[in-house]
Image: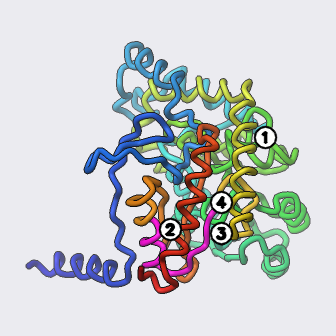
Amino acid sequence: MNIIYQKLQGEINQLKLNGNYRDFTQIDVVDFPQAKLPTSDKVVTIWSTTDYLGLGHNSMTKTSISKAVEQYGTGTVGSRNIGGSSSLHIKLEETMAEIHNKEAALLFSTGYGANDGTLSCLAQLIGDCVFISDEKNHASIINGLRQRAGCIKKIFKHNDLCHLEQILQTIDYETPKLIIFESVYSMDGSVAKIEEIIKLAKQYNALTYLDEVHAVGVYGAGGAGYANELGLDGQIDIIQGTFAKSYGVVGGYITGSRVLIDAVRSFCSNFIFTTSMPPMLVSIILANVNYLKSSNKERILLQQNVNNLRQNLLKHKLPLMLESASHILPIFVGEINRSKQIAAYLLNNYNIYVQAINYPSVEKGTERLRISITPLHSQDDINHLIYGLVDAFAKIGLNGSN
């Protein structure tokens, strides 16, 4: 075997040895949150999803997609610079800027690309700057902050305002600096101390960059996000979001001042050299965004279901991670093999699909089950999940053995 292939196989073998090798469960959604496993034709209930409001599978979205394909075709097959910028792209950017109380917005093909591209671009343009990032920020942020010439990256402990201020105190007041954090952290379900971070940013002359990926659609007026829910979105300098979670489609965006958005549009390689989102998808995103601007019923029902499930988890003494203050309800396991075995037990015995979350998504020793409920889960679904979890935790030992 060629030496390159040997090295690659060695890395894969090490993943398997550590228990971190990832197998994909094939799932074909039939009637969300129900889905079919094509390998067995078993129908299961999905409890690990980021389609938080079920818009990705509702009749409105399904109906509009066929009309959109007929009208706009299937793709742009070009970047925004080369025939890939339609009136729909402009309209969606204007809409997202308005939702977040910003001057302008810029679309990316993915949320990952929005974070990675924007942060690496700002590092390139600003040069002598300091990025201060929460330790639990998403991989797209981490990648965007990899060492760039002239830029310094500092990490503060998750939601630790004292540590954040200690870092800020070591940086000259006039040095360009950017505090980067998320509103809702998808693996813990914790929420950021947005108001306090804004105060520190103003005190120490820093800009703020807020990832609202897991909050847009779910919180705020018309789904404008967690900062909006607190009345603080106008005080955040850059807000990043996605259309691939609550809006049920795909793609990402940033919003901010006109000069910042124009600079990223003009210099960001991830944006300039990437094929733009197909107009048919943009039209569906626009429809879903506008729908959630006027409809609160999905958000209300989601919060009712979240509160219901949270109380049931606590009532049955299941190890809900108490950091969770959002719609994401992680169940602590703490051991990699055990987390996989519990997930497999639920799938095989209760037709419950819940994803075991392991390193590197979370720190070793903090493995968990990521539970997320939607407005479409019924009381029977909740009762069945609780019964299955109680049984699984009783049957599977601390070392992951039955």
The residue to which callout 3 is attached is: 318
Q: Which residues are magenta?
A: 329-343
Q: Using residue 283 as the reference point, say whether residue 41 is left or right of it.
A: left
CA separation, marks 1 and 4?
20 Å
Rounded to the nearest angstrom, the CA distance separating label 3 from label 4 is: 11 Å
Mark sitting earlier along the chain (3/2)? 3
Residue under label 1: 220
Comparing labels 3 and 2, the label whose residue is closer to the camera:
3
Picture residue at 18% right of the left edge, 77% below the top: 4
Quarter that holds the N terminus: bottom left
Q: Which mark is residue 329?
A: 4
User: Which residue is rendered at x = 54% and y = 22% of the image?
Assistant: 60
- Residue type at numbered disc 1: Gly
What element does badge 1 sit on?
loop
Give the foreground label among 1 and 4: 4
Of mark 1 and mark 2, the one earlier in the sequence is 1
Q: CA distance from mark 1 to mark 2?
A: 28 Å
